[in-house]
Image (cartoon, helix red, strand yellow):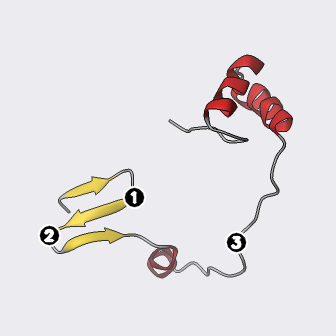
């Protein structure tokens, strides 16, 4: 492996770029991957603020500023 691309979760090898898929993980670890993907219900902005305050221990003002910057009920992970 020459290098790891953190942004795309892919490896750059001498033969080209390679990405690990869910099928690769299932084959390597002998895990059955069955069923459908989980879908999440959209959250209201006020619920997101409460979750951020409770779980991340930030102020309500910080939580609202992050939500405004992310244009919705989202936060950036860094």
Image coordinates of residue 72 in percent, x first then y, are 71, 41
Instruction: State left or right for residue 77 relative to residue 8.
Output: right
Graded by Cα atoms within 10 Å as few (under 14), some (14 to 19) or many (20 or more), the crowding at tag 2 reads few
> Which residue position holds label 1?
9
Name the residue tied to disc 2: 14
Q: Is residue 59 visible?
A: no
Q: Earlier in the sequence, mark 3 or mark 2?
A: 2
Q: Is residue 63 above or below residue 27?
A: above
Above or below: residue 71 compared with residue 53: below
Q: Where is residue 33 shown, x and y percent of the image?
A: 62, 79
Q: How many marks?
A: 3
Q: Earlier in the sequence, mark 2 or mark 1?
A: 1
- Residue depicted at 50% across the width and 79% down the height: 23
Mark 3 residue crowding within 10 angstroms, few (<14) / some (14–19) / many (20+): few
Query: For the residue labelled by badge 2, is the local secondary structure a helix, a strand or a loop?
Result: loop
In this view, the residue in front, 61 or 28, is 61
- List the residue tagged with mark 3: 37
Q: Quadrant of the N terminus?
A: bottom left
């Amino acid at each position: 492996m020459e290098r790891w691309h953190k942004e795309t979760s892919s490896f750059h090898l001498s033969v080209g770029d390679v990405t690990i898929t869910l099928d690769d993980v299932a084959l390597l670890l002998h895990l059955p991957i069955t069923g459908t993907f989980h879908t999440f219900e959209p959250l209201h902005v006020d619920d997101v603020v409460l979750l951020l305050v409770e779980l991340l221990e930030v102020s309500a003002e910080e939580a609202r500023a992050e939500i405004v910057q992310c244009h919705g009920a989202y936060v950036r992970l860094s």
